[in-house]
Image (cartoon, rainbow, N blue to C red):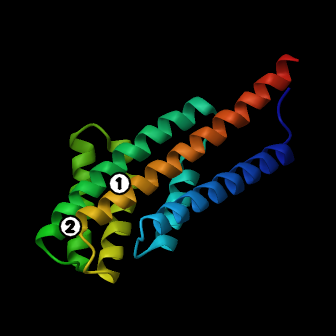
Amino acid sequence: MKPRPWRTALRNGLQFGLVSAVGYLIGLGVGKALHSNSPAIGALWCAIAAMSVLQDTFSAARGAARGQIVGTGIGAMISALYLQVLSYSGIGLAVCIGATVLACHLTRFAEDSRSAAINVAVIMIISSQHPDLNPFANAALRFLEACMGTVASIVVMYLWYRQRYLRQTD
């Protein structure tokens, strides 16, 4: 039986709402616990990472999670290395995003280049707002937040689809 459009819309709305709330709260808690200069931005980044992993099936979500983590890691390393040597600039942002996308393509992670590029923008813009923040600490924190959001999304998706499976077998 094919799901009704309103049920699919309701399911998607509930999933997005749930993972964004869980991601936001985890990111905010970690940011405050680590005395981050930007706990609200970290919470936002965690929620965005959680939402970007949502897919129609659990197996598709696992693949998206892998891409999110790999792309975020690549972007975090490139932006941290750049910011260790040079300070933030708009041209530097563009160079780092271009280098990150290139690195993703050359390492056969082309499909992950979007999340990597977004992560570079987040890291570099936070560094522009907080120039005294250590670039590697900033990059590590954004990577951690993205990983936490990704894990939160996978857990929610697992529980969601596990419940659905259990209901179908009763």
Q: Identify the residue at horizontal 25%, vertical 80% (top origin).
A: 132
Q: Residues within 10 Å of mark 2 (few under 14, many from 20)?
A: some
Q: Tell me if label 1 and label 2 are in contact, CB under 8 Å.
A: no
Residue type marked 2: Val
**Quadrant where the N terminus lies?**
top right
- Picture quadrant where residue 168 is located: top right
In front here: 123 or 3? 123
| x then y, percent, for residue 51 | 58, 53
Precedes in sequence: disc 1 or disc 2: 2
Q: Is residue 165 left or right of residue 133?
A: right
Q: Residues within 10 Å of mark 1 (few under 14, many from 20)?
A: many
| x then y, percent, for residue 42 | 47, 66
* Residue where numbered disc 2 is placed: 95
**Quadrant where the C terminus lies?**
top right
Q: Is residue 168 visible from the viewing direction of this image?
A: yes
* Residue where numbered disc 1 is placed: 116
Q: Is residue 131 left or right of residue 48?
A: left
- Picture quadrant where residue 127 is located: bottom left
Q: Is residue 84 left or right of residue 162?
A: left
